Amino acid sequence: MYTPPPRDRLNNGNSVSERRISRSFSRTNTPTHSPVVNGFDSPSNHEMEQYEIEIKRLQESEAEIKALSVNYAALLKEKEFPESISFHFPVNQMNHMNQMGRALFNPGPRHWAPPPWPLLPPPHSSFWTGSNVSSHLKELHDTINLAKAMQKELEMLTRMKESERTTEGHIGDADISIDRFSKFMKENKIELDFQESLSLNAANAVMSKLRYQLEPYRVVTDENSPWEEKSAVKRLADKMEKYKRNKLWRRRKRRRIAQNLAKEREQFDRLDKEADEWRAREMAKDAAQRKVDKMKEIAKVKAKEEKKRLESELELVLIVEKLQELRSIRIEKLKKQGHFFPEEDDKFLEQVRAAVEEEERQSMAAADTDAAKDAIANAEESRKHVDSHVPGSEELGLSNFEHIKNQDQKNETANEKDSKLAATKESRKIDTSGSAYDSVSNLPMEFYHYYHGSNTDMGTLIEVRRMWDAYLRPGGSRIPGHWVQPPPPADEIWASYLVKPK
């Protein structure tokens, strides 16, 4: 087995090996997007994570490499000849010759050792760049996979040799993979010893290559390595750690930005919804207000028309009153002068009086009918108000419209009542003189309501009758049935004014 030269030879600096290594490093492509040179925003920043993963795999495979070397040493000891045998025929040429049906050439044993790999000088800081570390790690990973494959092949050859010794060439109880491999060797006319020697030579070459590739990374574990190399490794590790932190920070930043954008979208949607609801409410309020304004205008127009009609009727009533006063004044004047009026005049006055009474009766009946209608309308309005629980925006406008309509009807009925009351008062004043007309018109509202309100309103009549019933019922304030004696005078001055009975 090939053993690497000691450490002092590496430090001496062989000229041939140095030239070979310089050529090998000159053939490597210089990185255009190295994370060490261009920072952590370059396109090859993702290589840092791969470097770290590969280094961890190398540390894990160190035990496997040691086990492989132990197995190879044991296999070499078991060989009949002391050293490895090698031929100058490549494996592909050998397979090609076997496919042609020729017998394999099996010469005698030779003393041969694999050519030594060029010795590496101590690695310097230029080695710890992104592209160099990446390429070396990739090659090391391929070499490790190849070493594992060689280990499996040697284990398979060992088991085949043991089974051949025990069963004299019969491999019936072995694995399927061993059976297939032995079948392949028989078909290609390959001897077991020849294949074993080739596998051992290949394993030695792989181990030498693996040592050669692992040599630059001994700086990480060797305490005697120069501080420049350790500082370069530390800088690369710090940059990788910084890249990981920056990547984690960028990931958190992206997540935070996405959350902020989602919150903004939710807030915009909520504000849009609130704006739409407010707009709908305002539109409903405007529609209801427009309806109310329109009904008010209609009510004002009707009130003006009614007022004009009442003014014209009142003018006619005043003219009739003035004419009646003028007639009464003329009659009084003629009576004073001694003129005599025939019976036709008395009949005419009786007809006029009868017509006035008939008109008063009709006006009272119409007033009672209007009062009943108002009571029915008020009851219907209260029932509708109780039935409607929570009106919406459109129901609010309709209820306002109905309320205004009912109010207008009440105003119209009140105006009609006032006009009829005025007409009744004026008709009653026909038979009275000017002094009587002045006394009735000058009465306060309370006295007029008490004495004359029952003529036009049933409610006033009931109210007055109840007031009188308080004096007529037992237990109430009744009118005494005897003469109420006045109290004695308080002093002599008041007593001097008393009238003594005769």
Image (tube, rainbow, N blue to C red):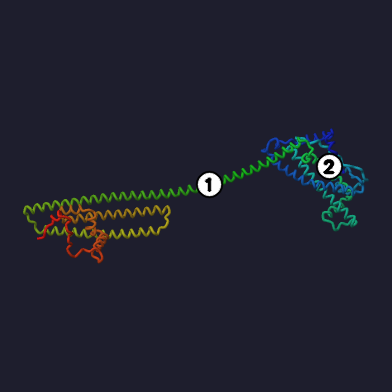
Disc 1: CA contacts within 10 A as few (<14), some (14-19) or many (>=20)? few
Query: Of helix, strand and loop, which one carries label 1?
Result: helix
| Residue 485 left/right relative to 88 | left
Q: Disc 1 to disc 2, how far (Cα)?
A: 67 Å
In this orientation, does residue 388 appear? Answer: yes
Q: Which residue is mark 2?
A: 208
Question: Which residue type does callout 1 highlight?
Answer: Gln
Q: Position of residue 20 (x, y in %)?
A: 82, 35
In this orientation, does residue 100 appear? Answer: no
Question: Which residue type does callout 2 highlight?
Answer: Ser
Q: Is residue 1 above or below residue 392?
A: above
Residue at the extreme front: 492
Disc 2: CA contacts within 10 A as few (<14), some (14-19) or many (>=20)? many
Picture residue at 53% right of the left edge, 46% below the top? 267
Q: Position of residue 378 (x, y in %)?
A: 33, 58
Q: Position of residue 327 (x, y in %)?
A: 13, 52
Q: Is residue 480 above or below residue 253?
A: below
Q: Earlier in the sequence, mark 1 or mark 2?
A: 2
Q: Position of residue 278 (x, y in %)?
A: 46, 48
Query: For the N terminus, which image quadrant?
Result: top right
Picture residue at 37% right of the left edge, 53% below the top? 400
| Residue 259 left/right relative to 281 | right
Residue at the extreme bottom: 474
Q: Where, by quadrant of the figure, is residue 21 drawn?
A: top right
Q: Where, by quadrant of the figure, is residue 486 drawn?
A: bottom left
Marking on residue 267:
1
| Residue 325 left/right relative to 187 | left
